[in-house]
Amino acid sequence: MKLGAIGCGNMAKAILGGIIKNGLIKPEDIMGADIYQPGLKEAADILGIRTTSDNKEAAQAEVLLLAVKPENYRGIIEEIKDDVKESTIIWTIAPGVTLADIDAYFGRSVKAVRTMPNTPAMVGAGVTAVTPNSQVTEEEAEYICSLIGSFGVAERIPESMMDATIPTSGSSPAMIFMLIEAMADGAVREGFSREQAYRLCAQTVLGSAQMVLESGKHPGELKDMVCTPGGITIEMVKKLEQYGFRNAIMEGMEVCTKCI
């Protein structure tokens, strides 16, 4: 299977790196295109893929990853649409660009899979929402999901839920990073070094997430396990609720969706 990628930024490199690392597609079978030459050279040096500054050359692949900003989709597709074969699967990662938009930009029905990855893909721990259109066979959709599985987890959803995925997993790493930073600030205030504080707090978030995924228990039940009667943890929970901890998170997620 030949894979083309238009755009070789950080997310594209994370995606291609996972695919190569897991042996799903060989580097020599991947063609990356970008007008930004330093980024293109970095992709070639790090990943060992073939590169070009000609988008049309990358567009001749069997799977074409469009890893450019949403506002650039129309122009890129206008440039390459006559070079894309009918059998090519278009793989998108742009928020707000719908499957209908892709057909409209091409001026015809194409095989397209709309996805929404997140930045933890850069460390092989991403979660990516996936919606194929009606032109994509189940076998083709599963193949794209297998590629996505090389850098995290693929979650099939209806397209109507795609915008809600942005605050749920797309933008929310920023919220988690803020949480870790705030926890670390609290730890530094108590005397920990900054390095120790980040390490302890990040590992705590990682371990807590692992408990949710592996225990099958409701997060509230896991929280109750930490909050012993009359203990210090329930005092912390009370103070967080006093300052609107959970409401602040939900409000942030809501405004994120409204901004799409």
Image (cartoon, rainbow, N blue to C red):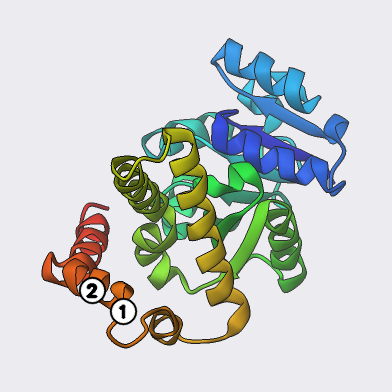
Mark 1 residue element = loop
Viewed as shown, does residue 239 lie left or right of 17?
A: left
Distance from disc 2 to disc 1, alpha carbons, whole Å, reads 7 Å
For this view, does 40 lie left or right of residue 236? right
Q: Residue furthest top?
A: 37
Crowd around label 1: few <14 · some 14–19 · many ≥20 (10 Å): few
Viewer can see residue 133: no
Give the x, y percent position of residue 11: 56, 38
- The three-letter code of the residue at mark 2 reads Glu
Residue visible at 60% across and 50% down in the picture: 91
Splitting the image into 4 quarters, where does residue 110 fall? bottom right
Name the residue nearer the viewer: 254 or 79.
254
Tag 2's secondary structure?
helix
Q: Which residue is found at the position 34% from the left and 59% from the top? A: 167
Q: Which residue is mark 2?
A: 235
Residue 213 is situated, as x and y percent measured from the top left of the image, at: 58, 75
Give the residue drawn at x 21%, y 65%.
245
Write the residue at 34% across / 50% down. 183
Front in this rendered view, residue 27 or 89? 27
Residue position marked by numbered label 1 in the rendering: 231
Query: Which picture quadrant has residue 219?
Result: bottom left
